[in-house]
């Protein structure tokens, strides 16, 4: 089983991307238009575009904005934070999340499970935020895989490292293996997988804008069977 992933870095020219891609779903278009910040609108447009790529143009949205496939048994998930937007599709329930490391500083202690708190004291200052970001990303990916998002208390999800690439997230809804990596030194990526041998099929989106053309047109043509650098 493979997880197909599409990844894009937020473009520098935000105004050019604020109108060029409109989701087919009218409720989704309205939801994006209601966002006050331009960067949030652009992230949402890019996420919709990436979902259209991993779903072969067959995605829609369930209540509360959860992406779903409208023409197959494909399961979908998307996330954006900081400079990155990501989307995933799989034949099994899947969750994906990207977390900007510096934002982990705002993660309240109440979001950690009792088993996670003891793992942080004594962590070198340079790695504590990365560890917090990986914990949060794993919790988000797990909850998305279950289809509940953050409708559950984050502290009710516990994480436990398996090796330097994987962690297990557990809650009342079940147990999930999560693959962790870094998109760059400032962003953590977490994707739920069935086992440690599962393959990521990654597509990098190059979002270039030229006057008079739609920018959301160029995906690197050949996917690479790989993950991202380790945490």
Image (spheres, helix red, strand yellow):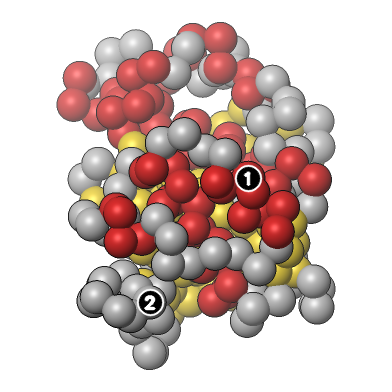
Residue 138 coordinates in the image, percent (x, y): 53, 40
Residue that carries the numbered disc 1 in the rendered image: 31
Q: Is residue 49 above or below residue 213?
A: above
Residue 125 coordinates in the image, percent (x, y): 20, 19
Mark 1 closeness class: few <14, some 14–19, many ≥20 residues within 10 Å: few
In this picture, residue 163 sits left or right of residue 154: left
Q: Earlier in the sequence, mark 1 or mark 2?
A: 1
Residue drawn at point x = 33 percent, y = 19 percent: 105
Residue 165 coordinates in the image, percent (x, y): 41, 52
Residue that carries the numbered disc 2 in the rendered image: 214
Q: Is residue 13 above or below residue 118?
A: below
Check if mark 1's residue and mark 2's residue have beta carbons within 8 Å: no
Front in this rendered view, residue 20 or 168: 20
Front in this rendered view, residue 189 or 53: 53
Q: Secondary structure at mark 2?
A: loop
Residue drawn at point x = 57 percent, y = 39 percent: 34
Marks 1 and 2 sit apart, C-alpha to C-alpha, by 21 Å
Q: Secondary structure at mark 1?
A: helix
Q: Is residue 8 above or below residue 73?
A: above
Front in this rendered view, residue 215 or 110: 215
Residue drawn at point x = 62 percent, y = 55 percent: 29
């Amino acid at each position: 089983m493979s997880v197909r992933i599409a990844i894009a870095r937020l473009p520098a020219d935000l105004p050019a991307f604020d109108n060029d891609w409109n989701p087919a779903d009218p409720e989704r278009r309205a939801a994006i238009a209601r966002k006050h910040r331009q960067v949030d609108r652009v992230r949402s447009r890019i996420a919709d575009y990436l979902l259209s790529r991993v779903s072969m143009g067959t995605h829609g949205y369930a209540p509360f904005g959860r992406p779903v496939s409208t023409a197959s048994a494909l399961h979908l998930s998307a996330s954006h934070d900081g400079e990155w937007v990501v989307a995933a599709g799989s034949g099994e329930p899947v969750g994906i999340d990207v977390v900007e490391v510096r934002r982990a500083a705002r993660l309240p202690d109440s979001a950690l499970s009792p088993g996670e708190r003891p793992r942080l004291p004594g962590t070198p200052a340079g790695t504590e935020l990365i560890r917090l970001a990986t914990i949060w990303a794993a919790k988000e990916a797990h909850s998305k895989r279950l289809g509940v998002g953050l409708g559950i208390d984050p502290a009710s999800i516990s994480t436990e490292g398996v090796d330097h690439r994987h962690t297990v997230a557990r809650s009342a809804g079940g147990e999930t293996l999560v693959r962790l990596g870094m998109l760059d030194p400032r962003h953590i990526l977490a994707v739920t997988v069935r086992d440690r041998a599962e393959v990521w099929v990654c597509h990098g989106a190059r979002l270039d804008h030229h006057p008079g053309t739609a920018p959301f047109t160029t995906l690197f043509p050949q996917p690479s069977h790989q993950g991202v650098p380790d945490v």
